[in-house]
Amino acid sequence: MNWFRNTGLGMFIHWGVYAVHGRGEWCQAQERIPTAEYDQRYMDLFTADEYDPEKWAQIAVRAGMEYMVLTTKHHDGFCLFDTKTTDRNAVKRGPKRDLVAPFVAACKKYGLKCGLYFSLPDWSEPAFFSGPHLTPEAWNDFLDRIVFPQVRELCTQYGQFDVLWYDNIIGMSNGKNSFEPNVNFRETTTGNTNDKLTAEDYRAAELNAMVRSLQPGILINDRSLTPEDFYTAEQNLTPPKDPERLWEACMTLNKHWGWYPADPYYKSPFEIIHAITGVAMSRGHMLLNVGPDRYGRLNSNEIQILETVGNWMKVNKEAVKGVTSGGLDGGSYGCSAKKGKYYYLFLHYASREGFITIPDCSKKFKSATLLGDESRVMTFEYKNDNVIIHNTPMPEYNVIPVIRLEAEEE
Ligand code: GLC
């Protein structure tokens, strides 16, 4: 758990057959494409010709990331790994090779922790839609034939890895959903409160006991509907209620997880770094997503954003790794984090005047250092209950400048 608590950033990779369609990983559901048609149209065009996970790893390392998580199977049910459970896998179709083994190897080679994402829902299985309440036998068969063996394969075929990242969908196993053209998808996915899946439905305790016996030391997220090791926030930065709980916030760079070249709504590096600092002060960290194309290439927008994030991380990572809230938050600049005797001020809104004020602060400080530029001399003024720091950087100095204060006592 230590590495997870002290890491600053990870890379999420959503990659699969949906990259051919190019409208995100939910395209099959949103456009109601029956599985047979989806397979026929897209599966063999997912060729992964330029797949080189070492390139991903290099980009991740340059971005200051310390782990990567790959979608080994998303909701469409197509397995990027070799499996005996179905022919809908990368060895039999499309790329005609196992895509998970080289991914795990690339993580190892570049010193990155390795996470494998696995979707418990599987749209290619009718039992997933009919659900455990209406069709208990078919549901158990789905677990015994697909879910348990596939998770076992992931845990036994690739050596040791570090994170099992389950995913889930609540509200589709209601006996009514399907992507067949005669079913009104919109009507059937809303408002039904009887279709909630539970940890018991997934036999999550049994599943995770198996995982832990095969992969001692693994971290498991909370999406098999038991709490396990860490909490996941998705597209938001809200920490868990228990401040001791490990957590991670995953976020897209544009508006989609899977490849979607027509989506231009990329977040700026400032927004991303702003989020990184916000999550860090609540003791979490971020898992930033990329969605490679069908050949395995990241797009240039993603690469550029991650380069800028990486340049920032190179200078400032100590301020977001393993920190807690600093409690020195002021309207004239932004927020703060703390590690031991060091306080880090994140200048989200660095003032134009060249000074900032920490309000209501009774602390005394020995020194103020601008990360990345130790030559800048900043001085303190203690006035009423305020601490004023002079000669702070102007906003254009860096995406978000960070000042490290050394307190006289912890
Ligand atoms: C949601 C979506 C899924 C995505 C995941 C990432 O659960 O269903 O497409 O993979 O979020 O957190």
Image: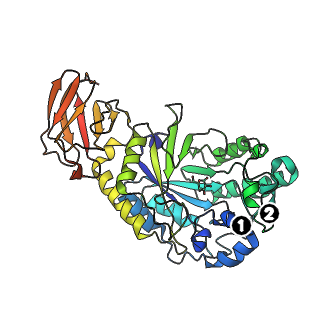
In this image, 401 relative to 139: left or right?
A: left
Type of residue at label 1?
Arg
In this image, 276 relative to 349: left or right?
A: right
Q: Is residue 382 above or below residue 37?
A: above
Q: Residues within 10 Å of mark 1 (few under 14, many from 20)?
A: some
Spatial distance from mark 1 to mark 2, Cα to Cα?
9 Å
Residue 181 x %, y %: 78, 69
Which residue has dot 2 on it?
Answer: 183
What residue is rendered at 23% in x and 34% in y?
Answer: 405
Q: Is residue 68 above or below residue 379?
A: below
What residue is rendered at 43% in x and 61% in y?
Answer: 266
Type of residue at label 2?
Val
162 or 93: nearer the viewer: 93
Residue 78 visible? The answer is no
Which residue has dot 1 on it?
Answer: 32
Which quadrant does the C terminus fall into?
A: top left
Residue 119 x %, y %: 65, 55
Question: Quarter for ligand 1?
Answer: bottom right
In this image, 348 relative to 57: left or right?
A: left
Q: Is residue 288 above or below residue 340?
A: below
Residue 247 visible? The answer is yes
Q: Residues within 10 Å of mark 2 (few under 14, many from 20)?
A: few
Circle on res. 105: none
Residue 226 x %, y %: 66, 39
Residue 250 x %, y %: 51, 50
Q: Earlier in the sequence, mark 1 or mark 2?
A: 1
6 or 368: nearer the viewer: 368
Label 1: state its secondary structure.
Answer: loop
What residue is rendered at 57% in x and 40% in y?
Answer: 229
What residue is rendered at 16% in x and 45% in y?
Answer: 374
Beta carbon of the mark 2 residue lies under 8 A of ligand 1 = no
Check contact, mark 1 vs mark 2: CB within 8 A: yes
